[in-house]
């Protein structure tokens, strides 16, 4: 049989897209394009699995490497500040990015606007994903309240020192 030029994996139970690979050299301009097509297919599969997965869109994570990070970020994933490195001990890939529904909607709206009108197949694929994204419930916590203030320093003992007079 034919060997695909690019592949990836969706693990619905683990809520993770991972193992992005492409047989083209990383310098080839089609490399990222093909990884993007794979991610589109995985996202559509995730969106179709959501009713039975008892999960929300934003529960999807990605295990991206240096090259695939650009691909997942382009469709609305955000890099995690503190990835869970204990997943390595469990033999699992590190979740490096988390899906963000508003960012994904904007990304696919932008993509649809940029696509050539003659590229019917690509436009239809982007529209299917965009429609499925728009059908999702808004993520919890979007109450419009301001985020809690961030400490000015990263010293975990600063509160302890302040309360004890040091």
Image (cartoon, rainbow, N blue to C red):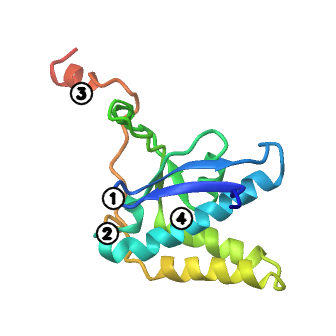
Residue 41: % across, % down: 58, 68
Residue 51 is left or right of residue 3, and the answer is: left
C-alpha separation, residue under disc 1 versus residue under disc 2: 7 Å
Q: Secondary structure at mark 4?
A: helix
Q: Is residue 135 left or right of residue 28?
A: left
Q: How many marks?
A: 4
Q: Tell me residue 61's x, y (percent).
A: 44, 53
Tell me the CA gap for discs 3 and 4. Answer: 44 Å
Please tell me whether mark 3 or mark 4 is closer to you in this view.
4
| Sequence order check, earlier mark of 1 and 2 | 1
Q: Which circle, 1 or 3, is nearer the viewer? A: 1
Of the numbered discs 1 and 4, the one sitting upstream in the chain is 1
Residue 53 circle label? 2
* Mark 4, residue position: 42
**Identity of the residue drawn at 69% across and 56% down:** 3
Tell me how far mark 1 sits from mark 4, CA to CA.
14 Å
Q: Earlier in the sequence, mark 3 or mark 4?
A: 4
| Residue identified by numbered label 1 | 13
């Amino acid at each position: 049989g034919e060997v695909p030029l690019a592949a990836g994996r969706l693990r619905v139970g683990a809520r993770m897209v991972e193992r992005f690979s492409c047989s083209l050299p990383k310098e080839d301009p089609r490399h990222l394009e093909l990884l993007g097509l794979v991610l589109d297919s995985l996202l559509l599969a995730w969106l179709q699995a959501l009713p039975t997965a008892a999960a929300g869109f934003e529960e999807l994570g990605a295990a991206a490497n240096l090259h695939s990070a650009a691909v997942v970020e382009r469709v609305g994933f955000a890099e995690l500040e503190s990835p869970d490195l204990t997943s390595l001990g469990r033999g699992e890939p590190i979740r490096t990015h988390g899906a963000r529904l508003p960012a994904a909607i904007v990304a696919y709206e932008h993509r649809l606007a940029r696509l050539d009108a003659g590229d019917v197949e690509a436009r239809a694929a982007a529209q299917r994903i965009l429609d499925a994204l728009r059908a999702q419930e808004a993520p919890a916590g979007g109450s419009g309240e301001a985020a809690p203030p961030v400490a000015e320093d990263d010293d975990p003992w600063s509160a302890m020192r302040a309360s004890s007079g040091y």
